[in-house]
Image: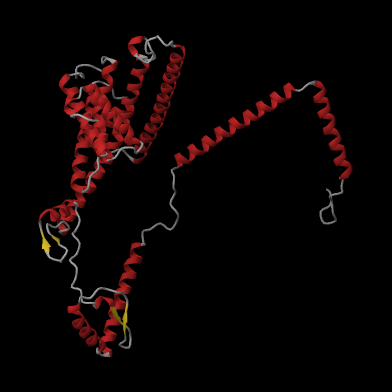
């Protein structure tokens, strides 16, 4: 991926961004790769607009097959932007705003080019008017989109298998002096009808995912905005940090802490050694940890410990009551935090996922039974009459021997007599 992205032609920029998007789906793309792919796809979206490949006066049926894929550039860019790596809520919010804008642009383009289905038009109109469907209707629409997405994936897989098989046959029949059978210009394996069908299916699938993604992005935006408002009200973001000596500093470290939305670490307290001792009932002092005490502070620390030992019994009792009160309040907060926790184990999968697993097991079991039955039938058909007669005779003799060894009623007893 060397060279400037702005110098790439449209086809190369689109191919580079699509490759990064495909790798990001399988988790094989790091932050730098996603950033490079986002820049390439952003350049492709710009080139599509500059070159005027998608005229608003044309429908999807009027677009040439080689230009139909560029309608997906906006959606690919939205997905890449949403997967960009961010380090604080403000930059994540910026990505979500751009993603929402790109989703809206993609749906608007599909609506202009008459590439929205009937169900998508209903959801789209409802979203524009700000209406919210009832839960049952929303669930039914989501189930229908899920079934349609699964059907589209099956069709895409069938197209891939067909193209692979056609390519395999073309390579097998090609001679060493033939032109490249994979080259579309040499009459190879490319099929324009299948290519067009593929991109139409991808556009339909992208529209369905966009309708689901719009609500998710809006919910995440609202959550981040509330979080930033709460942080601003509580003064969570500060403009100062502490250096290694405990003093307040500004500059780069403070700016980075502010950008990350985190409080800088608390300044270290003066090292006196008092944090390493605890006063037990009766006035005894117990060391609970080893810490470094500077030579100049050892005498002051010893003096403080001596004064603590000389505390009266009444002061010790007051300290114990305060510690018990703090422990009880801590236990109370812990119990309150568990009030709304479920008292049962939450499910790990949905009903639809469990049904799919059971259905796949049923299909495998049925196929296995049919295979065993066909295998047994084939073995029976391959046997001669003499083998069949011999096998029947052996079976009859085995049954006679079993009856001789186990006469009728021999298994009964006085407690369980034969009926």
Task: Examine the image and state in which quarter residue 203 appears.
Answer: top left
At x 44%, y 44%, the residue is 349
Please tell me which residue is depicted at 33% across the width and 21% down the height of the picture: 200
Give the percent coordinates (x, y) of residue 103. 24, 33
> Would you say 189 lies left or right of 285 here?
right
Assign the N terminus to one quadrant of the image: top left
- Residue 209 or residue 296, whichever sits in front: 296
Task: Check the image and report above or below for 356 versus 330.
Answer: above
Q: Residue 143: x, y in percent?
A: 39, 35
Residue drawn 32% across the image and 11% down it: 185
Pick whichever, 140 or 330, lies toward us.
Answer: 330
Please, is residue 396 above or below residue 417 in the view? above
How many numbered circles are shown? 0
- For residue 224, say whether it is visible: yes
Which x, y percent locates residue 9? Answer: 20, 22
Front-lying residue, 76 or 34: 34
Q: Residue 101: percent from the left, percent from the top? A: 19, 34
């Amino acid at each position: 991926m060397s060279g400037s992205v702005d110098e790439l032609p449209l086809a190369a920029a689109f191919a580079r961004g699509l490759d990064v998007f495909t790798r990001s789906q399988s988790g094989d793309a790091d932050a730098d790769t996603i950033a490079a792919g986002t820049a390439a796809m952003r350049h492709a979206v710009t080139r599509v607009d500059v070159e005027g490949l998608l005229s608003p006066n044309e429908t999807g049926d009027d677009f040439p097959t080689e230009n139909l894929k560029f309608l997906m550039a906006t959606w690919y860019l939205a997905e890449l932007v949403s997967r960009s790596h961010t380090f604080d809520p403000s930059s994540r919010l910026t990505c979500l705003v751009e993603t929402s804008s790109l989703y809206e642009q993609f749906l608007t383009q599909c609506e202009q080019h008459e590439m929205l289905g009937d169900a998508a038009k209903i959801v789209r109109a409802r979203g524009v008017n700000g209406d919210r469907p009832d839960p049952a209707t929303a669930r039914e629409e989501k189930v229908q989109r899920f079934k349609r997405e699964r059907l589209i994936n099956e069709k895409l897989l069938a197209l891939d298998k067909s193209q692979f098989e056609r390519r395999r046959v073309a390579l097998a029949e090609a001679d060493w002096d033939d032109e490249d059978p994979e080259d579309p210009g040499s009459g190879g394996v490319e099929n324009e009808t299948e290519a067009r069908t593929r991109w139409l299916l991808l556009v339909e699938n992208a529209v369905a995912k966009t309708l689901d993604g719009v609500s998710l992005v809006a919910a995440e935006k609202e959550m981040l905005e509330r979080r930033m408002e709460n942080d601003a009200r509580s003064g969570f973001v500060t403009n100062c940090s502490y250096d290694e000596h405990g003093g307040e500093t500004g500059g780069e470290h403070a700016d980075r802490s502010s950008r990350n939305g985190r409080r800088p670490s608390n300044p270290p307290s003066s090292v006196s050694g008092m944090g390493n001792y605890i006063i037990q009932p009766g006035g005894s002092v117990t060391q609970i940890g080893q810490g470094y005490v500077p030579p100049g502070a050892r005498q002051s620390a010893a003096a403080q410990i001596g004064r603590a030992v000389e505390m009266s019994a009444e002061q010790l009792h007051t300290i114990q009551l305060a510690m018990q009160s703090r422990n009880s309040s801590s236990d109370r907060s812990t119990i309150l935090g568990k009030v709304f926790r479920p008292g049962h184990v939450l499910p790990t999968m949905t009903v639809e996922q469990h049904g799919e697993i059971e259905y796949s097991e049923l299909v495998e079991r049925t196929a296995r039974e049919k295979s065993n039955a066909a295998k047994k039938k084939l073995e029976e058909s391959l046997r001669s009459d003499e083998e069949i007669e011999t096998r029947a005779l052996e079976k009859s003799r085995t049954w006679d021997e079993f009856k001789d060894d186990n006469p009728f009623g021999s298994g009964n007893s006085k407690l369980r007599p034969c009926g």
